[in-house]
């Protein structure tokens, strides 16, 4: 069963949390950013849910926790209301920098999120282009990585696995392509979009095609592990718990 509060965290940390990587990797997104005349910081504040601020300028996007230093702010009375914005485009209530916020959301922000959707939910035809395929797979990995932490800290079932996970860093990535760090402390998860320096555990996919198959559910994780195409090392109980949380991510982001 999907919990609306946990879905809000998956959306905030997984889907919207990938905007900074979109702006870093995607040429179309970089062109969209050039329309920004002045830097703008937009906070999405969800009652009984997440609160983050997205800072946009011509160079890219940065994300910070909380509402501090936000030029504009949109509030949502419940996680359900925030999820409606993500899934159906229904906005919350503008409470700060209203005019500036509405202009940005209806223009540049919508263009960026539309582009992100194209990459995260690609058509079969689009995937025939190798460059698009690789970028789509990388952004999917970043989305999944963000959602792991979002759900580990909010979903009642994922929190059981988080509660059984020891402190330390887990390296998750695609060999020679991209690495992220899942940091666990006191059973709280945080996703860092950098390579782990001293990981306590490692889960690495052999190549980008394998990662695509795993994310799409078209290949067997067990079979690929037996073939040696998924590298596992270190404290394997950490990887096992993350794999359990990944099952929840698949449910929430399907």
Image: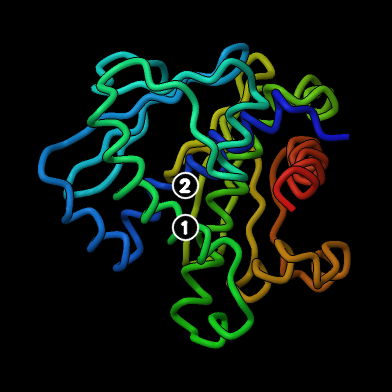
Relative to 95, 8 lies left or right: right
Q: Nearer the viewer, residue 67 or 240?
A: 67
Q: Which residue is mark 2?
A: 18
Label 2 environment density (alpha carbons within 10 Å; few <14, some 14–19, many ≥20): many
The structure residue drawn at horizontal position 51% and vertical position 46%, both measured from the top left corner, is 180
76 relative to 108, above or below: above
Q: How is the image coloured?
A: rainbow
x and y, in percent, of residue 112 in the image = 37, 54
Q: Residue at x 57, y 81 (%)?
A: 127
Q: Residue 251 location, x and y as percent?
A: 80, 46
Please tell me in which quadrant of the rendered image residue 88 appears.
top right
In the foreground, 211 or 72: 72
Report the front residue among 220 and 51: 51
* Residue at position x 85%, y 27% in the image: 157
Question: In terms of secondary structure, where does tag 2 sit?
Answer: helix
Residue, disc 1: 116
CA–CA distance between discs 1 and 2?
8 Å
The quadrant in which residue 40 appears is top left
Q: Are marks 1 and 2 in contact (CB under 8 Å)?
A: yes
Toward the left, the furthest residue is 37
Q: How packed is label 1: few (under 14 Cα within 10 Å), some, or many (20 or more)? A: many
**Residue 183 point in image, percent of width and height:** 56, 30
Q: Earlier in the sequence, mark 1 or mark 2?
A: 2
In the image: residue 5, left or right of residue 44: right
Q: Position of residue 173 (x, y in %)?
A: 57, 55
Position of the N terminus by quadrant:
top right
The secondary structure type at the circle numbered 1 is helix
- Residue visible at 63% across and 39% down? 147
- In-front residue for pair 142/107: 107
Of discs 1 and 2, which sits in the foreground?
A: 1
């Amino acid at each position: 069963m999907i919990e609306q509060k946990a879905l809000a965290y998956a959306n905030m940390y997984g889907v919207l949390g990938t905007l900074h990587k979109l702006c870093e990797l995607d040429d179309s997104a970089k062109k969209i950013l050039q329309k920004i005349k002045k830097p703008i910081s937009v906070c999405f504040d969800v009652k009984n849910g997440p609160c983050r601020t997205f800072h946009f300028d011509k160079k890219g996007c940065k994300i910070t926790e909380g509402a501090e230093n936000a030029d504009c702010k949109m509030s949502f009375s419940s996680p359900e209301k925030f999820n409606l914005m993500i899934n159906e485009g229904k906005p919350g209530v503008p409470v700060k920098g209203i005019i500036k916020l509405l202009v940005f959301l209806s223009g540049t922000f919508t263009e960026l999120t539309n582009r992100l959707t194209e990459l995260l939910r690609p058509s079969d035809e689009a995937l025939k282009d190798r460059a698009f395929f690789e970028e789509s797979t990388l952004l999917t990995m970043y989305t999944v990585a963000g959602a792991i932490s979002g759900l580990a800290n909010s979903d009642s079932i994922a929190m059981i696995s988080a509660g059984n996970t020891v402190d330390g860093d887990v390296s998750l990535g695609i060999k020679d392509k991209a690495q992220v760090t899942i940091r666990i402390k006191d059973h709280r998860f945080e996703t860092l979009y950098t390579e782990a320096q001293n990981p306590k555990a490692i889960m690495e996919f052999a190549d980008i095609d394998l990662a695509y198959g795993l994310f799409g559910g078209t290949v067997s994780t067990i079979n690929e592990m037996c073939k040696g195409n998924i590298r596992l090392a270190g404290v394997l109980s950490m990887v096992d718990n993350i794999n359990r949380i990944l099952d929840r991510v698949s449910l929430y982001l399907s």
